[in-house]
């Protein structure tokens, strides 16, 4: 094991982690609130929840998984898969909305 | 000419001995696993969301009580992620007792999550939900629900076992900081997947 490598990435302080935890709880509370008020049809709700979940995932990856303290090289090698998945959302979700709208009641 | 270009190439690290990512092999391996696993979950979640939104009579079996339970489960997983990251930073300081305490709390969160989740599965099965049928609507509901949450729960279970093994090795001095950090990566990933399952499976099928 290369000790220089291991100690190169210092994480943020424990206080920062606690704040990230609080942000994640707040975002979860917003999602639950949106589910209660039911202002949006399932398709709109799906898009909103997806965006909020992506924000939460980004917070977890950036701070809890220390992505912020990795080399840009490494981060950029992992990114293409994320971009692929987000691109897939824009193919599949509009198609499922279309199916929903085309359905004869 | 040829020799010149070879020495130039080795100067930028083609002969090995250079770490372009500046991470150890364990961490790189875990990230590659997380990458492939996230693609698996993405396929399942996108497939589920597709049929969920395209079906007008998708069952909405989750009432206030089950959403409250699922919120508690989310809280447990998020908090176990916090204790895990505190354990990793304690390992960085070399505070052995704090590492073991935090890993223990993380495992406790995972076990609590599984108990609540299995209890919910039992409830749904008693109401008549099966992989191929349910009393309310689109028969696909059971199949997608049990596949998604079941695969996730399998990850939580293996995560608890993995953390237990890491904690045992760490307390004996066999494992070091890197092992704790890499197991933390796995645990955060399990938490991250739940951040998608909770809104897409539970909140989209909420019946107030």
Image: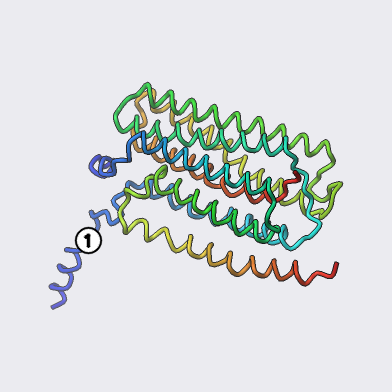
Which quarter of the rendering shows the C terminus of chain A? bottom right
Which quarter of the rendering shows the N terminus of chain A? top left
Q: How is the image coloured?
A: rainbow
Question: B186 and A98: which one is in front?
Answer: A98
Question: B196 and A72: which one is in front?
Answer: B196
Give the SS element for disc 1: loop
Q: Residue drawn at (84%, 70%), measured in percent from left and top? A: A104
Coordinates of residue B29 in the picture (x, y in percent): 41, 49
- Does residue B47 appear to the left or right of B57 in the view shown? left
What chain does badge 1 belong to? B
Question: A61 and B23: which one is in front?
Answer: A61
Q: Residue drawn at (35%, 56%), measured in percent from left and top? A: A74
- Does residue A19 appear to the left or right of A25 in the view shown? left
Quarter location, residue B40? bottom right
Q: Residue drawn at (53%, 63%), measured in percent from left and top? A: A86
Coordinates of residue B121 in the picture (x, y in percent): 73, 37
Q: Residue furthest top?
A: B97
Coordinates of residue B34 in the picture (x, y in percent): 48, 50
**Residue position marked by numbered label 1 in the rendering:** B13
- Does residue A104 appear to the left or right of A19 in the view shown? right
Q: How many marks?
A: 1
Q: Residue drawn at (13%, 73%), measured in percent from left and top? A: B4
């Amino acid at each position: 094991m290369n000790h220089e490598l291991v100690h190169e990435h210092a994480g943020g302080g424990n206080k920062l982690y606690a704040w990230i935890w609080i942000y994640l709880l707040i975002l979860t509370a917003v999602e639950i609130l949106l589910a209660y008020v039911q202002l949006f049809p399932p398709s709109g709700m799906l898009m909103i929840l997806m965006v909020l979940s992506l924000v939460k995932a980004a917070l977890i990856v950036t701070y809890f998984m220390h992505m912020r303290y990795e080399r840009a090289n490494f981060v950029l090698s992992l990114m293409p898969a994320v971009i692929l998945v987000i691109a897939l959302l824009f193919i599949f979700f509009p198609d499922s909305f279309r199916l929903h709208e085309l359905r004869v009641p | 000419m040829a020799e010149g270009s070879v020495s130039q190439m080795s100067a930028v690290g083609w002969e090995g001995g250079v770490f372009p990512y500046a991470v150890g092999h364990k961490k790189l391996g875990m990230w590659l696993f997380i990458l492939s696993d996230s693609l698996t979950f993405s396929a399942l979640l996108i497939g589920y969301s597709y049929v969920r939104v395209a079906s007008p009579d998708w069952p909405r079996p989750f009432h206030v009580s089950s959403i409250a339970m699922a919120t508690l489960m989310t809280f447990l997983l998020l908090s176990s992620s916090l204790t895990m990251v505190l354990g990793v930073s304690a390992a960085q300081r070399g505070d052995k007792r704090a590492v073991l305490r935090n890993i223990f709390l993380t495992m406790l969160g995972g076990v609590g999550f599984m108990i609540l989740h299995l209890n919910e599965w039992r409830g749904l099965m008693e109401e008549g939900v099966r992989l191929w049928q349910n009393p309310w609507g689109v028969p696909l509901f059971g199949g997608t629900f049990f596949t998604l949450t079941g695969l996730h729960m399998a990850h939580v279970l293996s995560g608890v076992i993995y953390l237990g093994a890491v904690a045992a090795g760490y307390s004996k001095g066999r494992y070091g900081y890197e092992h704790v950090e890499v197991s933390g990566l796995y645990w955060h990933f399990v938490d991250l997947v739940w951040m998608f399952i909770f809104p897409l499976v539970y909140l989209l099928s909420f019946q107030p």
